């Protein structure tokens, strides 16, 4: 069990991580989505949200960046909350793929199964499950309302990013229709894909990501607003999914190094969940070859090591 840590110690670790990592120059902005290529690559912020609701923040923590694949986490929880963890396991799965986030091969290798809601195939499938089925506006309200519950504040789509993603999401279109072929899409495939694309284009700040992570760490109760956002028993379920596949083909290396369940997005954000202790997030646009922020990984790895946040 990780011991509770006092706020001053976390504040100090976050500040130190920022100082140590701010001059890191590795990686490159995502460029397969034109909007992301143009986000200033020097942006860098770290935030942590603690059980008493204090949000510690250093650097560019109010900058709104694309949530991208981190959005797969709230939608997976929402689907489990609306149905059950077992139904999501049966309809989508909870397996690691060991393959890139947008892999079509993963669907074929898993014998037509989307693997996990935390890769593209499973995330599109999860969007198709979200209720009310058949109602795009209703689904969108459910997803954004849920993210706002986790973050404790409002979010909105970055329109330019949504347009940019929609104009370039050919691979995801193939995934949606391949899943339809295998009966793994539970609503209209084009609608599910559009909801997925839109949720990836939501703008969030590092402070919001840290609060989302803290809500997950805190058994579904937002430590800032005190709202119970989802069923407490789903916290270990989503943390296990994040631990299994949160960094795609680099997940094992990350978990071995830090022991911290976390989820990345190509917008440069990473959200880490320390069960029962806190949520932590970092943001910096340049990515490694698997699509994970280089600087945010370094910062979170430093904090995890320094504060002994290894869940194992
Ligand atoms: O599906 C896509 O290509 C993106 N909109 C999201 C991918 C992503 O963030 C992968 N994560 N590191």
Image (cartoon, rainbow, N blue to C red):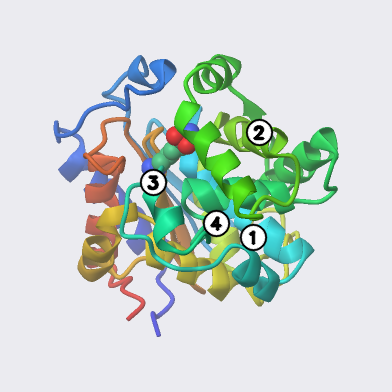
**Of label 3 and label 2, which has the lower sequence position?**
3
- How many angstroms separate mark 2 from mark 1 (CA)? 18 Å
Q: Residue furthest front?
A: 181
**Of label 2 and label 1, which has the lower sequence position?**
1
SS at mark 1 in the image: helix
SS at mark 2 in the image: loop
**Residue 224 placed where, x, y %?**
65, 54
Q: Residue furthest bottom?
A: 1
Residue at image position (48%, 66%) is 241
**Residue 83 placed where, x, y %?**
77, 66
Q: As drawn, is 97 to the left or to the right of 82?
A: left
Q: Which mark is residue 155?
A: 2
Mark 1 in CB contact with mark 3 (< 8 angstroms) = no
**Of label 1 and label 3, which has the lower sequence position?**
1
**Of residues 297 and 2, the one drawn nearer to the viewer in this rendering:** 297
- How many angstroms separate mark 1 from mark 3 (CA)? 22 Å
- Can residue 222 be seen here? no
Vertical position of residue 64 compared to residue 3: above or below: above
| Quarter of the figure with the N terminus | bottom left
For mark 4, what is the residue?
117
**Residue 100 placed where, x, y %?**
33, 47
**Of label 4 and label 1, which has the lower sequence position?**
1
How many other residues sit within 10 Å of disc 1, few (<14), some (14-19) or many (≥20)? many
- How many angstroms separate mark 4 from mark 2 (CA)? 22 Å
Q: Which mark is residue 103?
A: 3
- How many angstroms separate mark 3 from mark 2 (CA)? 29 Å
For mark 1, what is the residue?
77
């Amino acid at each position: 069990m990780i011991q509770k840590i006092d706020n001053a110690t976390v504040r100090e670790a976050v500040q130190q991580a920022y100082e140590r990592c701010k001059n890191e120059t590795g990686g490159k902005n995502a460029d397969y989505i034109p909007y992301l290529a143009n986000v200033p690559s020097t942006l860098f912020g770290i935030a942590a949200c603690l059980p008493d609701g204090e949000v510690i923040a250093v650097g560019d923590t109010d900058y709104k960046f694309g949530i991208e694949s981190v959005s797969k986490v709230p939608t997976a929880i929402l689907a489990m909350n609306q149905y059950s963890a077992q139904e999501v396991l049966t309809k989508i799965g909870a397996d690691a793929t060991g393959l890139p986030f947008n892999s079509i091969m993963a669907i074929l290798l898993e014998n037509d199964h989307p693997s996990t809601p935390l890769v593209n195939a499973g995330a599109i499938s999860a969007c198709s499950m979200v209720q009310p089925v058949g109602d795009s506006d209703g689904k969108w309200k459910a997803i954004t309302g849920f993210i706002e519950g986790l973050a404790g504040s409002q979010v909105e789509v970055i329109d330019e990013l949504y347009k940019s993603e929609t104009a370039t999401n050919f691979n995801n279109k193939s995934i949606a229709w391949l899943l339809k072929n295998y009966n793994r899409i539970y609503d209209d495939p084009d609608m599910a894909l559009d909801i997925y694309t839109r949720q990836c284009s939501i703008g969030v700040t590092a402070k919001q990501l840290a609060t989302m992570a803290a809500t997950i760490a805190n058994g579904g109760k937002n430590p800032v607003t005190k709202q119970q956002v989802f069923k407490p028993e789903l916290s270990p379920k989503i943390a296990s999914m994040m631990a299994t596949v949160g960094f795609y083909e680099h997940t094992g290396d990350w978990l071995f190094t830090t022991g911290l369940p976390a989820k990345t997005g190509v917008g440069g954000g990473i959200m880490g969940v320390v069960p029962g202790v806190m949520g932590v997030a970092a943001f910096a646009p340049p990515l490694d070859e698997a699509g994970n922020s280089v600087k945010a990984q370094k910062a979170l790895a430093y904090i995890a090591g320094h504060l002994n946040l290894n869940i194992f």
